Amino acid sequence: MCTLTWLTSEQGFELCFNRDEARGRSRAIPPKIYQIAGTRVLMPIDPDGMGTWIAANEHGLLVCLLNDYQGQSSVVPKRSRGQLVKSVARARDLTQVGHIVSAHTMTDFSPFNLLVFRPASPIGTPPRCPAPKAWHWDGQTLKRIECVPPVVSSAVVPDDARRTRSALLASSLHASPSVHGLIQYHRSHEPVLGSLSVCMHRDDASTVSFTHIRVSSATTSMYYYDGAPCRVSRPLVTHLPLVTDNITPLKANTGSDTD
C-alpha cells in the first residue's frame, strides 16, 4: 500500500513516496535529523515500531522500504522492518549498504522491498537518475532485484494496482517529465478514488503521508506532507547538508517545492 517514484530535474535528483497505512496506525513523527552510529540521518519515525520507511543521510544516500504483502514468512517476525531502514541509513556508500543488509537475519523481518539510491552526476554534465540498489525479501529468500518507477505495494489487488499506477505514470510524464508532474501524479485519484489510485483511499486504509526528497549539489531537502497529498498542500521542510567530499555534485538546489 505504497508508491515510490523518482526522476532527475534541473534542481537535482527527485524522489517521491506515498505511504499508505491502515486506519488504526499511529501518526508518524515528522522528519528531523538524528545521529546513527556517527552519521546524520534525516527521517520521519513510525512510533508503532520506532523505525521508518524512508531516510536520507549526509552522505547522499536515500533508503526506502515497501512492504511485500504477498510474501510468506516461515517464522513469526521479531523486528519492525523500519528498523532495517534505520540500520542501512548509517552507511557511507552502497558497498557498506550491501554489508549491512547481509549482516542482518532476514527471518527477523516480514517480507519487503528495500531500495537504496546514491544520486550523483559528473561535473559539467546533466544530472542522471541512478538505478537503485534493491533487494526483495519474500519471507524465504533474499535476492537482488532491478526496479523502475513506479514501485508499488498493495495488500489489495496488487497486480491491478501496479498496472494502473504504471500506466498513469507513463501518461503523466510522457509529454513533460518534471517534478511538478511527479507531485501531481502522487496526488492523483485516477482512474477513480479508491484502491487503485496513487493517492489511495479505502475504508480500512489510506495514503497517510507524501514525502518528496530533493538531492542537490550540497543539500538533501525533505518535503513532508503530513496527510493525504490530495488534502495537504504545504509541506514540512527540513534540509540536511551533505558531506561534500563524499559526493559528486549535482546542480544547485532552488529550495522550491513548487517548480
Image: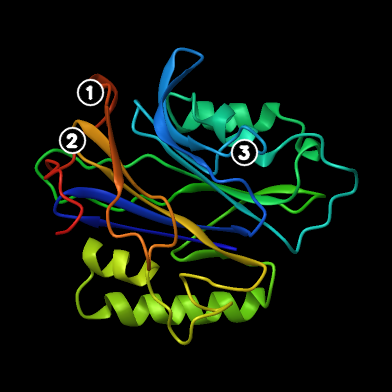
- The foreground one among 128 and 235 is 235
Residue 195 in percent (x, y) is at 59, 77
For label 1, the residue is 244
Alpha carbon of mark 3 to alpha carbon of mark 2: how far? 28 Å
Instruction: Using residue 66 as the reference point, say whether residue 80 is left or right of it.
Output: right
Count residues near mark 1 (Cα–Cα under 10 Å), then give few for <14, some for 14-19, many for 20+: some
What's the residue at 55%, 74% (across, down)?
162
User: Could you tell me which residue is drawn at 76 percent across and 47 percent down?
Assistant: 110
**Looking at the figure, which quarter contains the C terminus?**
bottom left
**Label 2–label 1 contact, CB within 8 A:** yes
Residue 153 visible, this angle: no
Mark 3 / mark 2, whichever is N-terminal: 3
Q: Nearer the viewer, mark 3 or mark 2?
A: 3
Q: Which residue is mark 2?
A: 217
Badge 3 amino acid: Gly
Query: Of marks 2 and 1, which one's residue comes earlier in the chain?
Result: 2
SS state under label 3: helix
Residue 119 lies, in percent from the top left, at: 32, 42
At x 48%, y 25%, the residue is 91
Look at label 2 and name its amino acid. Ser
Query: Which amino acid lies under the numbered mark 1 shown in the image of this protein?
Result: Thr
Which of the two discs, 3 and 1, labels the residue nearer the N terminus? 3
Q: Secondary structure at mark 1?
A: helix
Question: CB atoms at circles 3 and 2 under 8 Å apart?
Answer: no
The x, y position of residue 102, in whole percent, is: 67, 31
| Image mark for residue 82 | 3
